[in-house]
Image (tube, rainbow, N blue to C red):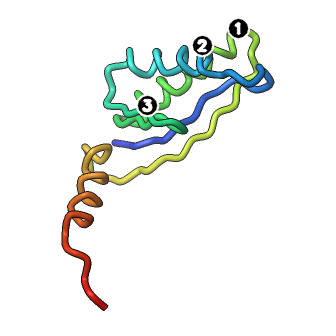
Amino acid sequence: MNVLVAVAIAPFGMGDELAPYVAEAIRIIRDSGLPHRTTSMFTEIEGEWDEVMAVVRDATFVLAEQGIRTEVILKADVRPGYTGTIDRKIEAVESLLAEPTPKA
C-alpha cells in the first residue's frame, strides 16, 4: 500500500547546531531511491509502506547506532489507490492559487 510520510529525524541533546546530524539521516533517505522532498522542518517520502518505514528506520538508526538519543516525528497519509501524491497535492493547491480570487 502506498504511503506519503512527513518525517523529522534529529538528535536530542546535541547542542544548537543539528545540521550535520540531520544530513546523515537525509543521506539515507536520498540514497533509498524513493521519491522525497526535504524542507526546513520535514522530509517527505513516498512509496510502499514497508519500503518507506524501512528507510525511516535506517535514517533513525544511523544516529541511534552512534549512541545518540534520536527524536522522530512522523505523520503518514495512507490513501489506498493513490500514488504520486508527493507532487499531486502541491499541484492541486498551486492550481487553485493560480485562479483569480472570487470577489465577495
Q: Nearer the viewer, residue 36 or 52?
A: 36
State the image coordinates of residue 17 (x, y, percent, origin top left).
68, 21
Residue under label 1: 66
| In the rendered image, the vertical position of residue 31 relative to residue 38, given as above or below | above
Which mark lies nearer to you, 3 or 1?
1
Query: Which residue type does callout 2 highlight?
Result: Val
Picture quadrant where residue 21 is located: top right
Residue under label 2: 62
Q: Earlier in the sequence, mark 3 or mark 2?
A: 3
Query: Which residue type does callout 3 highlight?
Result: Val
**CB under 8 Å between callouts 1 and 2?**
yes
At 39% from the left edge and 43% from the top edge, which residue is drawn? 3
Picture quadrant where residue 11 is located: top right
Which residue is situated farthest in the right direction here? 13
| In the rendered image, the vertical position of residue 7 relative to residue 23, given as above or below | below
Query: Which residue type does callout 1 highlight?
Result: Gln
- At numbered mark 3, what does the secondary structure look like: helix, strand or loop? helix
Which residue is situated farthest in the top direction here? 66
Residue 52: mark: 3
Instruction: Using the rendered image of the protein, determine whether residue 58 is visible from the camera's viewpoint.
Output: no
At 56% from the left edge and 24% from the top edge, which residue is drawn? 57
